[in-house]
Amino acid sequence: MHMHSHDHSHHHHDHTPKLDHLNAAFIWGIVLNSAFVVIEVIYGLISGSLSLLTDAGHNLSDVASLALALLAFKLAKAKSNKNYTYGYKRSTIIVSFFNAVILVVAVGFIIYEAVMRFIHPEPIAGGTIAWVALAGIGVNGFTAWLFVKDKDSDLNVKGAYLHMAVDAIVSLGVVISGVIIYFTGFIWLDSAVSIIIGVVILVGTWSLLKDSLRLEMDGVPKDIDLQKIKAELLKGKGVVDVHHMHVWALSTTENALTAHLVISPEHMAMFDEIKHDLRHKLEHLSITHSTFEPEFSDEKCQQPDC
């Protein structure tokens, strides 16, 4: 006899990170950075600074990223329906990947414009650049601080934190170049700083791009240890083997697992108790949804490995 018992019930404890308090952080970030983008564009045009204009473009992408992340958090709370049985949780993964791609594309434009400015240099006001970028350190530093406590709990929060922290560092570089240009007249420094900005953004974005792409492809989330999970399942009463184990992300904060559990015949009647015990243990390993299929130890599984 080969039993199939797919179970989707969940333990009453909820180990999913609660990030409701971040709504205000996202709104603050959107408002402050939108205002700063306007300031950068105005003074970038007045001073003729490429680094200010490119940083304004990057900050505008940050505003869009924060807005999309906030939207994804809202969608993730929407109830499931007959067409989307998991609800809209996956929107958080799509947004994190989309934001990472936007940043990589933006780097290409930044570097291209910097090279063009090297070839065709124009006079710029170093003092104006320095003062505006100094304000940027305050805006980006404060916004990054809003996300620092929760940056390891969600990929979108990590993305927001990285964007803001990198921008604060970049603004510091612009301040330094502005001061040097003001005293030396070395206008080529503006283009050099633009290229450095591009490289810094790329480095800061690369891990976000890899992690979000992994989740987009239903890969095992980065912080999940499959061997540790399998070892935990094998500790279950009567469990003699585990196979067909799959783990993937439902959202940037929730993970799911399916697995075949080979149960000794004398313990098969206890399967309900076994699965509830294992589910509770897996919740402590960041698995929020689990589905188990039991098999007798003296039966051969008919499904091919995948």
Image (cartoon, grey):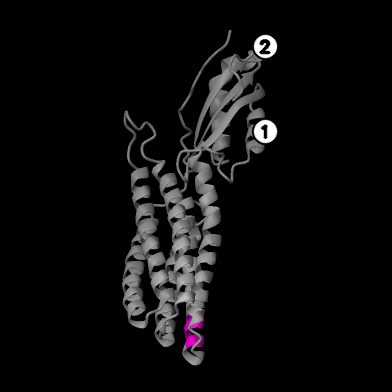
The residue closer to the viewer here, 287 or 201, is: 201
Label 2–label 1 contact, CB within 8 A: no
Range of magenta residues: 175-181
Q: Amino acid at mark 1?
A: Ala
The residue closer to the viewer here, 298 or 165, is: 165
**Rendered view: 56 above or below 185:** above
Q: Is residue 177 found inside the magenta-colored segment of the image?
A: yes
Image position, residue 209 (x, y; %): 51, 51
Q: Is residue 55 found inside the magenta-colored segment of the image?
A: no
For the residues labelled 2 and 1, the Cα–Cα distance comes to 21 Å
The main secondary structure of the magenta stretch is helix
Asked if residue 18 can be seen in this view, the reply is no
- Element at label 2: loop
Q: Residue 227 lies in what quarter of the image? A: top right
Q: Which residue bears the numbered disc 2?
A: 298
Q: Amino acid at mark 2?
A: Asp
The residue closer to the viewer here, 105 or 129, is: 105
Q: Quadrant of the N terminus?
A: top right
Q: Quadrant of the C terminus?
A: top right
- Element at label 1: helix
Look at 49% across and 70% down and name the residue there: 115
Relative placement, left or right, of 125 versus 232 is: left
Look at 43% across and 55% down and name the residue there: 102
Asked if residue 242 can be seen in this view, the reply is yes
Q: Residue furthest bottom?
A: 183
N-terminal label among 2 and 1: 1
Image position, residue 288 (x, y; %): 49, 37
Q: Residue furthest top?
A: 1
Look at 51% across and 80% down and name the residue there: 189
Q: Which residue bears the numbered disc 1?
A: 231
Image position, residue 212 (x, y; %): 50, 47
